[in-house]
Amino acid sequence: MSVLIDTHAHLDFPQFQNDLKQVLERARQAGVSALLNAGTDIKSSLRSLELSKKHTAISASVGIHPHGAGKVTSGWMAQLEKLAAEQTVLAVGEMGLDFYRNLSSRDQQEQVFREQIRLACRIQKPLIIHSRQAHAETLKILKEEKLPVSVGVMHCFSGDRHWAESFLNLGFYISIAGPVTYPRSHDLRDLLKYIPSDRLLLETDSPYLPPQAYRSERNEPAYIKLTYERVAMVLNIDLDDLAKQIYLNAIRLFSDNLVDRL
């Protein structure tokens, strides 16, 4: 069985509070050996850290999602920096800009984004970037700020070839999620051909964005196998070869601490 890695999930969210044990068992049976659980605010980041300490196959990232940028309170950066220093925390994020929903003002989003980039540089851990209808502004900030040596990943990427190449040129990895399986996602599947094999990651973004076979249902890490299968088909490569490449890419970016069988 291929060894699969889910590089972005939110198992600390309420959608998993009643059956996390079963979710992890289904992931194990599907061949998922490890996953990274991404924090989205201080409380979520703390839960993410707790998951990583309880389950050796779960690593954590800690960060403030752009939706919550306007809700941070005094001392948030000190709290986040303390969490980020933990050994099982492999990245800073999910951070970035979201000009689709605009649940926080653009100024608030940009300020909190910049401060998290600076944190990642201080502790030399990679960035996990959320960018929705804000690629130009995201790129501008990333070019203006110093980036960590390992740079980071554009999570759940949905931009075109131009934007992919722009972020790749900065040293970022590109992560693809369940929408690559959707019938109308022709552009996203075409984009796969332009992402270097050593800069590609795959994720579920659970509980969101389930693959086509589970549309309208809660997403979970076990379903990432369908994403791997579709990507392997599009790239016309063996599933095992794709899984090995994603494995190498993930540990190159996040460290080999990411991998430990479920």
Image (cartoon, rainbow, N blue to C red):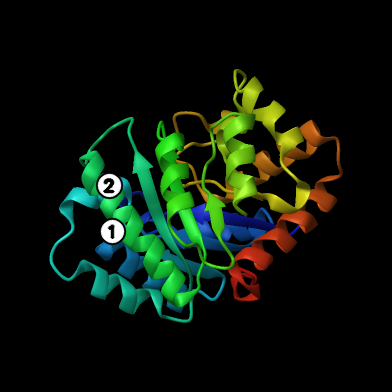
- Residue 117: % across, % down: 40, 61
Residue 176 percent coordinates (x, y): 60, 41
What amino acid is at disc 1? Answer: Asp
For mark 2, give the secondary structure: helix
Q: Amino acid at mark 2?
A: Gln
Q: Is residue 159 above or below residue 114?
A: above
Q: Secondary structure at mark 1?
A: loop
> Residue at 54% of width from left, 32% of height from top?
159
Left or right: residue 222 compared with residue 118: right
In depth, the one of 198 and 59 nearer the eye is: 198
Residue identifier under label 2: 109
Q: Quadrant of residue 157?
A: top right
Determine the residue positioned at 60% across, 18% down. 184
Marking on residue 41: 1
Q: Mark 1: few, some, or many residues within 10 Å (few <14, many ≥20)?
A: many
Residue 46, x across and y down, in percent: 31, 70
Q: Quadrant of the C terminus?
A: bottom right
Q: How would you rate the neighbour count of disc 2 (Cα within 10 Å): few for under 14, some for 14-19, many for 20 or more?
A: many
